[in-house]
Amino acid sequence: MDARTAGPGAGTRRAAALAAGLLCAAALALVALAPTPAGAQVEGAAVYDRWCAGCHGVDGDGQGPAAGRMLPRPRDFTVGLYQIRSTGTGELPTDEDILRVIDEGMPGTAMPGWSEVLTRAERNALVEYLKTFSRFFASSPEPEPLDFPRAPGSSEEKLVRGREVFELIECNRCHGPAGRGDGTSSPTLENDEGHPTVAADLTEGWMFNGGGTVEDIYRRLRTGLDGTPMPSFSDLVDAEVISSEDLWSLAHYVRSLSPGERPPVREVVTARFAEEGPVPTTPDDDAWDEVERYWVPMVGQILLPPRWFNPRVDGLWVQALHDGQELAVLVTWSDPSRSPDPAWDEWATKVMEVMDHPDAGSTAGAGPGDRLTVQFPATATEGMERPFFLQGDARRPAYLWTWRSWQAGPVEAEARGLGAEQPQPADGQDVTTAAVWEAGQWRVLFSRSLTTEGEDDPPFAVGTAIPMAFQAWDGDNGEQGAQGSVSTWYFLSLQQPTPMAAYVAPVVALALAFGLLLLMVRRAQRREEGAQAPASRV
Ligand code: HEC
Ligand code: HEC
């Protein structure tokens, strides 16, 4: 085993890898494994046939047996077209460029990283072997990396200028006003193979295929991503439409749209006790700015047919608050369209045509809309026992909250298996939702009382860890039914209120305690009086 995996921090890395690895693992399972050759000499061909050919094809033409299920498709190495280069647009990559992609993979696509699977010697041998698939490498001079100065420092003015340049040279046309891939051209973007292509979400810099540092971004702007609609902007600098400083300011601005690094994956989502009063009732409430965000990575649903290898939603930000009475869970995620949106119909149709979907259940075009489901166990769990994370099973049902962009309700349901959900009756719906779509982002708020009168509503007890999982669908990406993205289980933990005594002098606390006692007595009396009246929520 690689010594690095055993170092400190390996735990968090493993947690993060767990979710992301799900997709890769299944993709790899599709790859037919050939036996390992014996002998000390590392043969690129043997390593390639074993690990790469299942996707990229034995002949390097991108036509491996698993290729039809992926979007983007595995690279066809015979044409010598590479996205991640330090060289000018249209040029071949250097050996270091190819090695980098092999080491780190291409986040957001099926291309895994290999630095922890293969030895350095094996990866070097692969670089040499990949180059043999295209005659261009033998017939062209050694590719020269473009020479850039080091990144200048950032400043408020540079970020403001960067934002101006973003609009001036129309990055927003594809990437949208806030960088979430919702530009006016987005529904029409195609790569060189004619396959629908998503403009990168610039608020998730850790997913950039060529790296997320300011230098990486600047280099991408100079080189472009060959084979995709993402152009090189070197010609604008050469023609003095913008200066190189402007391009650096732009790179700083793009960098500023994402967190400093890949957000850590934490198993426990804490619902803070809202000391300042009742929980917010809208996703826009400023109070949310003060509430901690938890990143929940999402992967395509590939455990049960019909599987889905082209998920749009790659992660959610989750925030939660409670006030002792009410629980509020706010879920925020990037989605370039407010489905259903006719502007994206053609896109969805193309996606479904391109995705080879032998599994029954797939349909031709857009799904009915966007959807988010939050799942909890329907019955109190013993110890760490949780239902199957895809909407439970016969023995351990799941309790679901579902928000749909195309209809108001019902929100609460019980499920005993994927797609086998039974909505609770209309008069038993205790969850409310409020949703906003703006600049390529959904913010959906779910609220429910900690305890309800519904028999099928599990209570949310303060101080316990409640298993919680998510599913998301983008209708305009053709997603519906089992074809969407899923998370693994997390725990929702409702924070205990800070004891009164910590704030107020003991005497005052004592008085308050008596006051509270009185209040409780009075409330109990009133309840008795009102016993005949119809039940109402407290
Ligand atoms: C599970 C499928 C899968 C496997 C296995 C796989 N790849 Fe890929 N690979 C892809 C996909 C998909 C892309 C295209 C991603 C894109 O276009 O954004 C890709 C792209 C690439 C690229 C192009 C980089 C660029 O700059 O354009 C290289 C190089 C590459 N893979 C090398 C390898 C090597 C070497 C192996 C074996 C060690 C391998 N891949 C195994 C799916 C796979
Ligand atoms: C014509 C549409 C289009 C325009 C204009 C455009 N982009 Fe892109 N951009 C894309 C697409 C599509 C991708 C994703 C390509 C892929 O990985 O398949 C992308 C990817 C990116 C990436 C991710 C790079 C990586 O390493 O994965 C960054 C950063 C980026 N664009 C920034 C910009 C900036 C800044 C501008 C303006 C100067 C810009 N783009 C203009 C379409 C566009």
Image: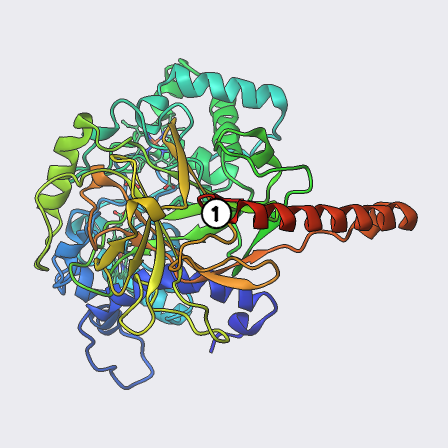
| Quarter holding residue 10 | bottom right
- Mark 1: C-beta under 8 Å from nearest atom of ligand 2: no
Answer left or right for 405 relative to 104: left
Amino acid carrying mark 1 in the image? Gln
Crowding near pointer 1: few (<14 within 10 Å), some, many (20+)? few
Looking at the image, which is closer to me, 373 or 99? 373
Image point 85% across, 48% down: which residue? 509
- Identify whether 145 is placed above or below 415: above
Viewer can see residue 446: yes
Q: What residue does disc 1 label?
A: 532
Image point 57% across, 46% down: which residue? 529
Answer left or right for 153 relative to 42: right
Q: Report the image quarter containing ligand 1.
A: bottom left
Q: Position of residue 363 (x, y in %)?
A: 9, 47
Q: Position of residue 459 (x, y in %)?
A: 49, 58
Image point 41% across, 70% down: which residue? 386
Q: Position of residue 469 (x, y in %)?
A: 40, 57
Looking at the image, which is closer to me, 493 or 139? 493
Q: Position of residue 40 (x, y in %)?
A: 34, 83
Image point 56% across, 58% down: which residue? 493
Looking at the image, which is closer to me, 184 or 469? 469
Tell me the quadrant of the picture where the C terminus can be found. top right
- Identify whether 253 is placed above or below 65: above
Q: Helix, strand, or loop for circle 1?
A: helix
Looking at the image, which is closer to me, 404 or 151? 404
| Quarter holding residue 381 | bottom left
